[in-house]
Image (cartoon, helix red, strand yellow):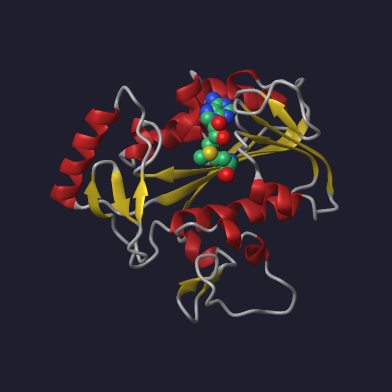
């Protein structure tokens, strides 16, 4: 799926992704991605920000973000979207005293009633759910429960160098199969973002749990899960030396609950 070429941030004339750098052409009103540029650390984050911005700009009704962190990008765009009636965000790192939009909770026990939300978004978290004892299946069943009939679940997740083992090693077919089978979704769609962006930069200088961010020369640390860290590090270094590893790309999953 040539998601980059379908993406409004991809400039096919200049063959660049405008979400990544500041070189993009400015057109008419201020583009969504310029709101998120402060958060742009590298290609991966910029790509994620593009996906989040698009979902937030298209959302309507009642919205929940799962694993929000501080929800910078989603919150900034959602707050400008008049079609959004209300939004909440949950994360295990939020205090147990609820703030206005932010609620303590994990995906394994979402603190909201059944059939509550039109859109549940979860960005760059599914690869971490196991760190709080939640499975892909259990988390998605909870998301399914809180979605209204006809509601949409949108996920974005990185492939390679991040999160649980399937994600770390880029086992995308396995990840997609688990997501599709987790709940009785009415429709399931996957978009591979940046996967076939040509040339996709490759991980350089994998060493001691860090790598060189493509195109920048900066080192970026990868937080490995404590128990598996050493094993993953060794396997990954071997895989890198043998075949080379492409830098992260994103899977966007769009799942709907039947009406
Ligand atoms: C890499 S951060 C992404 C934050 C935010 N979605 C963003 O795009 O900036 C991953 C987040 O997922 C949260 N998280 C990890 N495991 C979770 C779980 N089982 N349930 C809900 N959130 C979880 C973490 O606390 C963290 O805030």
* Quarter of the picture holding the N terminus: bottom left
Front residue (pair 187, 179): 179
Q: Nearer the viewer, residue 212 or 64?
A: 212
Q: Image quadrant of residue 217?
A: bottom left
Residue under the point 59% across and 67% down: 8
Q: Position of residue 127 (x, y in %)?
A: 45, 34
Residue drawn where x is 68% and y is 69% of the image: 31
Instruction: Report the label total.
Output: 0
Where's residue 116, x and y in %?
78, 28
Q: Percent x, y for residue 90?
A: 67, 30
Q: Is residue 49 visible from the viewing direction of this image?
A: yes
Q: Quadrant of ligand 1?
A: top right
Q: Is residue 123 visible?
A: no
Across and down, in percent, residue 16 comes to 47, 73
Tell me where residue 67 sits by quadrant.
top right
Residue displayed at 53% across by 52% down:
48
Residue at figure coordinates x 59%, y 80% from the top left: 25
Q: Is residue 225 left or right of residue 64?
A: left
Quadrant occupied by the C terminus? top right
Where, by quadrant of the figure, is residue 98 drawn? Answer: top right
Q: Is residue 100 left or right of residue 254?
A: right
């Amino acid at each position: 799926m040539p998601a980059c070429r379908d993406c409004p941030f991809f400039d096919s004339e200049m063959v660049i992704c405008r979400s990544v750098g500041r070189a993009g052409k400015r057109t008419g009103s201020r583009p969504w991605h310029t709101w998120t540029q402060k958060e742009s650390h590298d290609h991966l984050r910029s790509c994620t920000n593009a996906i989040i911005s698009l979902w937030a700009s298209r959302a309507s009704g009642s919205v929940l973000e799962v694993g929000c962190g501080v929800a910078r990008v989603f919150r900034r765009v959602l707050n400008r979207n008049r079609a959004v009636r209300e939004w909440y965000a949950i994360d295990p790192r939020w205090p147990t005293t609820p703030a206005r939009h932010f609620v303590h909770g994990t995906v394994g026990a979402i603190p909201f009633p059944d059939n509550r939300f039109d859109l549940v978004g979860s960005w760059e978290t599914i690869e971490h759910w196991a760190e709080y004892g939640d499975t892909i299946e259990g988390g998605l069943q909870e998301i399914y429960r809180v979605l209204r009939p006809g509601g949409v679940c949108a996920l974005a997740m990185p492939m390679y160098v991040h999160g649980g083992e399937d994600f770390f090693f880029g086992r995308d077919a396995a990840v997609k199969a688990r997501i599709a089978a987790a709940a009785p979704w009415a429709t399931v769609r996957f978009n591979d973002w940046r996967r076939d962006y040509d040339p996709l930069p490759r991980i350089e200088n994998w060493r001691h749990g860090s790598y060189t961010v493509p195109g920048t020369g900066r080192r970026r640390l990868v937080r490995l899960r404590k128990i598996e860290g050493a094993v993953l590090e060794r396997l990954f270094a071997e895989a890198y030396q043998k075949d080379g590893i492409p830098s992260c790309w994103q899977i966007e999953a769009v799942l709907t609950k039947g009406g």
